[in-house]
Image (cartoon, grey):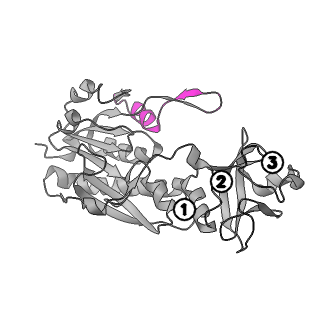
Amino acid sequence: MVKELKDLKVVFMGTPEFSVPTLKMLIETTNVVGVVTQEDKEVGRKRVLTPSPVKVCALENNIKVFTPHRIREEYEDILNLSPDIIITCAYGQIVPTVILDYPFYGCINIHGSILPEYRGASPIQTAIMNGDTETGITIMYMDEQMDTGNIINMEKCEIDIKDTYGTLSDKLSIIGRDLLQKTLPRIIKDDNWNIKQDDEAATYTKKITREEERLDFNKTRKELYDYVRALNPTPLANIELNGEEIKIVETEIGEELSGEIGVITKVDKKYFSIQCKDGLLNITKLKRAGKNIMDTASFLNGYDKEKLLNKKVNLNGEE
């Protein structure tokens, strides 16, 4: 058994920027013997092969990095590190039982919701989409199923009406880092919570598909406003306008108005407005293909306004 945190041999599993604050904390306070992350991915229009933020951090600190294509089949190198504990934070693959059963202190996960609510792949985005005013971080023991293990600790966090997936992720990543730092000493002393989840109260999330990025104007203004926030900064919601896909970065809830769903009914100097189920959604910031993000005022300066007013969006090229 380990008595001091600095002697704790940790294997860390994570991939996005969300995971980096926790990895940095573990490097400073424990003995991180290895990092497992997703394979390098092609990024941008030029398809540049790019390592994950977690891989970059690990290599900067001279830590061994493993990028198994399928961790269910490629795990021997991880076990050979003889970790005392394995900590996952937005890794991106299901961890097999052979790994879960290995460490003396088990495998624990940092999850971006208050479990058992929002198990699965997109808890932060789903909380924003649903218009929630509160979410949080749960630290839990891992088992064979998705986010069903016993709860070790949790902390709640307010969701501001202007929070996006990006800003809320940043807040939660720091909460997760700090909560883990407070929790780890109790884990090695066997003085921590170990509370079974209420499976009957569980709700689930899933990975957001490409098709689900398209805005559906049969929804209310508030629902669409929240949806755009939930997909910002990535992958970004979109509309199709005059045969062009336009990414929607930022919106405002417009006036209550009835009219034909999906039609641009107003063009202002700073925005254009699309008819929703219960009124107008003002598009205030957007991104065209191959261009940088711009405010709608700049977009309108270079766009024929006659091609906007009374046009219906999301026609898939049909007129």
Can you say which quadrant of the picture contains the N terminus?
top left
Distance (Cα) linking label 1 and label 3: 36 Å
Question: Is residue 234 visible to the viewer in this orientation of the structure?
Answer: no
319 relative to 171, above or below: above
Would you say 25 lies left or right of 53 here? left
Q: x, y percentage for residue 59?
A: 41, 30
- Confirm or deny contact between disc 2 and disc 1 (CB under 8 A): no
Which residue is denoted by mark 1 in the rendering?
163
How many labels, in total? 3
Residue occupying the point 42% across, 57% down: 172
* Label ID, residue 249: 2
> Magenta residues?
44-64
Q: Element type at marker 1?
A: loop
222 part of magenta stretch: no
Q: Nearer the viewer, residue 185 or 263?
A: 263
Kindly indicate the quadrant of the structure image that contains residue 196: bottom left
Counting residues from the N terminus, which is met first, the one under dot 2 or under dot 3? 2
Q: Nearer the viewer, residue 187 or 142?
A: 142
Q: Residues within 10 Å of mark 3 (few under 14, many from 20)?
A: few
Counting residues from the N terminus, which is met first, the one under dot 2 or under dot 1? 1
Q: Residue flagged by tag 3: what amino acid is it?
A: Glu
Residue occupying the point 56% across, 52% down: 231
Q: Tell me the mark number nearer the camera, choosing from 2 and 3.
A: 3
Q: x, y percentage for residue 5?
A: 21, 46
Q: x, y percentage for residue 179?
A: 31, 57
Residue occupying the point 34% across, 38% down: 13
Would you say 169 lies left or right of 214 here? left
Distance (Cα) linking label 2 and label 3: 25 Å
Which residue is denoted by mark 3 in the rendering?
319
Q: Tell me the mark number nearer the camera, choosing from 2 and 1.
A: 2
Would you say 284 lies left or right of 147 here? right
Q: Residue flagged by tag 1: what amino acid is it?
A: Asp
